[in-house]
Each structure stands twice: as C-alpha cells, then as structure tokens.
C-alpha cells in the first residue's frame, strides 16, 4: 500500500514535522472561569500529539479580548504556567504545538467586561441570534469603535501574549485573523468603516494585522509565527464584496515576512458568504510562496489530493480530532474513523465527558 502523502515528513522552516497532519484550533471551554489551562487540557492535547503540528484552541491575549465562556487566556503568569502542563505533555510524546492568539472584538458582550462594550474596528453589530454570556444568552450589542490612540495598546497585548507563549514552552504562535474576530473585523470592508489610517482602503485595513505580525515577530523569529485567514467565511456575520481583492493583498503582503505558514480556511464547511467565487488554495499559491495550510471540511482523500497536487504543504483537521485522538494512527493503518462527536459536548464545560474519554481504535 502506498503511504499517504499526509504521512510524509515536512520541514516547517526550522521545525521538522513528522507528518503533514495539523490538529486545527478547537475551542472546547474546559479552562474554567479562571481561564487558566489545567491538567485535563494537558491530557487532551497529549492524546493528540501524534499530529505533525497542533495549533491550540483560540487563547485570549487580554481581558478585553474575552468573550467565550471558560476559554483559556495567556495574559497572566498563572495562565502561562497552566499552559506549560500542555506543552510538556505534547513534547513528551514528540509533538509540536503553536498557541493561537485571539481577540474576539465585537463577537463579545459587555457582561464579559464589567458592563463596558466590546470593541471593534467600527460600531457595527453582528446580525445574529445572540451570544452565550455569564448571564445566559443575550442579544449582540453594537460595539465601540477603538480610538486610533488605543490601537498600539492592543498591538502591545499581542506582543506580551506572544512573550508569555514562549515562557509557556510553545513552539510558536498563530495569529487568529479569521472567522470574524477583531483582526478580521479590521481587514474586511463590511466591518471596517474607519476614516483613519486603519481604514478606507485595502492597504489601510491590513495595517493592524501588519503591526501585530511585526510585534509578535519581535518576540519570536518570523519562522515561528503563523497567520490564519478565512476569506470565504460567513461566520460571525462576515463577508465583504471586495473579499478577493482584500485577501489577495493580505497574502501578498504576508509573504514578505517569512512566516512559519499561512493557514487558510479555504473549505466552505464553516459557512460561505456567497459574495463571489470562493478563494481556493490555488489563489493563495499564486501569491504566497511560504508553507501553506489548508483547512475546513477536508477528508483524508481530499487532503491527500491537495498535498499530492502541490496545493498545500499541510492540512488541518478539526472535528475529526474531537472523537479521534489517534487520527494519525487511523490514517496510517487504514482504520475507520469513530462516530462524530456529539455537539452537546463540544463546548459544554463538563470535564472529561466528550473531551478526553474517546478511546483509540481497538478493532471491530
């Protein structure tokens, strides 16, 4: 049997990866109200450490960045110490793990911030059925547009979070610029109506991401910094008419930084805004010369085809990793996947249930 292209090793800048399978970031809400990573989370990531690379669940860079119940942070020393449990567990099994840096922006609520409104590029609310908050589900609010003078402080929060990620023992960091969170809110014309130097043009809308990449690269070599984009996604009420021009420009500019990788949600399984032909890995290969990760809805067969065809260097799997901690071993041996995980346990803070209790394959 011909080995799967997914099982080929890959040199990610200065990091040797033993295969081309990436565990995608998956918010699981097991950090508790303190947002300090714990031993249960370390067990979960350790179980999945055969992946060539793990990208951690989205991790907030500051109190202002919060907006998801019991998700982890990286803005205190205690949080960095808590994450050390996970990095040690992954490294003990020969794995590699990057920390995803997150600011939710308008996808938050004032109940997470002592009554203060969430912030965004502009004062434009999410159109949706509401958000889960510490006080139950509530309607989305109109966010407060960040003042120009406040933005360097947000950039500084990314830098400080990146520094703590080094202390916590991560192998690198990924900047979350996708899925309608703060950086994506600055990138897209739908949510960025600013008239200062952070808005008004494709280049200006890229400015915040560029400044964050520069700040994070002051704490890490650029080859240990990744960026995640979602050009086609409608999640969090996103989607802009000029998305193809915007994200082509973004990828072209990011290519000059020598990043670890560009992580593109090119699949449509997470929702599609239908504002034009979706952007594909081929579009990004044309303007981005560094390592490229494809993500969203891939099967083993479509992932193998993308790598064999040279469209991607690595493929990230999300939902299959929830119920298949031994995903690499299943692909290696041709074993069937477990039944998909029950959505009721994806985010519910119910401890090990639906989190670390999925068994490895034991045969029929």
Image (tube, rainbow, N blue to C red):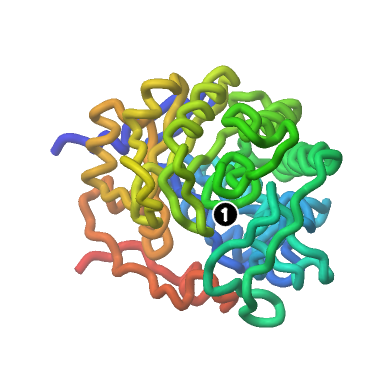
Give the vertical position of 1 relative to 124 (above or below).
Answer: above
Q: Is residue 261 above or below residue 24?
A: above
- Answer with left or right where residue 171 lies relative to residue 166: left
Q: Quadrant of residue 169?
A: top right
Quarter-wise, where is residue 17 in the image? top left
Q: Is residue 266 left or right of residue 164?
A: left
Q: Residue at x 27, y 45 (%)?
A: 332
Considering the numbered disc 1 on the image, is that residue within a helix, a strand or a loop? strand
Q: Nearer the viewer, residue 28 or 287?
A: 287
Residue at the disc numbered 1:
57
Looking at the image, residue 241 sits to the left or right of residue 122; the answer is left
In the displayed image of the protein, which residue is found farthest to the bottom?
Answer: 136
In this rendering, would 113 be left or right of 121? right
Residue closest to the eye, 338 or 304: 304
Q: Residue at x 38, y 67 (%)?
A: 359
Task: Choose between 277 and 298: the one closer to the eye.
Answer: 277
């Amino acid at each position: 049997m011909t080995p799967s292209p997914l099982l080929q090793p890959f040199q990610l800048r200065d990091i040797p990866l033993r295969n081309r399978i990436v565990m995608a970031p998956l918010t699981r809400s097991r950090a508790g109200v303190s947002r300090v990573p714990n031993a249960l989370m370390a067990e979960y990531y350790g179980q999945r450490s055969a992946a060539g690379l793990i990208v951690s669940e989205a991790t907030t860079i500051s109190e202002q960045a919060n907006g998801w119940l019991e998700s982890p942070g990286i803005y205190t020393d205690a949080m960095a110490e808590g994450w050390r449990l996970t990095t040690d567990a992954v490294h003990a099994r020969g794995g590699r793990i990057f920390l995803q840096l997150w600011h939710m922006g308008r996808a938050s609520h004032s109940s997470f911030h002592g009554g203060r409104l969430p912030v965004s590029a502009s004062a434009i609310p999410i159109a949706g059925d509401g958000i889960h908050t510490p006080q139950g589900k509530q309607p989305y609010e109109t966010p407060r547009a960040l003042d120009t003078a406040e933005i360097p402080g947000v950039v500084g929060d990314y830098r400080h979070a990146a520094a703590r990620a080094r202390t916590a023992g991560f192998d690198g960091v990924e900047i979350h610029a996708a899925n309608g969170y703060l950086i994506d809110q600055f990138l897209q014309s739908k949510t960025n109506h600013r008239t200062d130097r952070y808005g008004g043009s494709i280049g200006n809308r890229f400015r915040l991401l560029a400044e964050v990449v520069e700040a994070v690269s002051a704490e890490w070599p650029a080859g240990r910094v990744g960026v995640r984009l979602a050009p086609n996604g409608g999640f969090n009420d996103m989607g802009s008419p000029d998305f193809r021009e915007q994200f082509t420009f973004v990828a072209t500019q990011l290519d000059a930084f020598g990043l670890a990788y560009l992580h593109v949600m090119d699949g449509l399984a997470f929702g599609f805004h239908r504002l034009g032909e979706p952007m594909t890995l081929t579009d990004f290969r044309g303007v981005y010369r560094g390592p490229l990760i494809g993500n969203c809805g891939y099967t083993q067969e479509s992932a193998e085809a993308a790598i064999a065809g040279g469209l991607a260097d690595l493929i990230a799997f999300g939902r299959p990793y929830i119920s298949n901690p031994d995903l690499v071993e299943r692909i290696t041996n041709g074993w069937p996947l477990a039944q998909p995980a029950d959505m009721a346990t994806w985010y519910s803070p119910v401890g090990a249930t639906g989190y670390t209790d999925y068994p490895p394959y034991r045969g029929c």
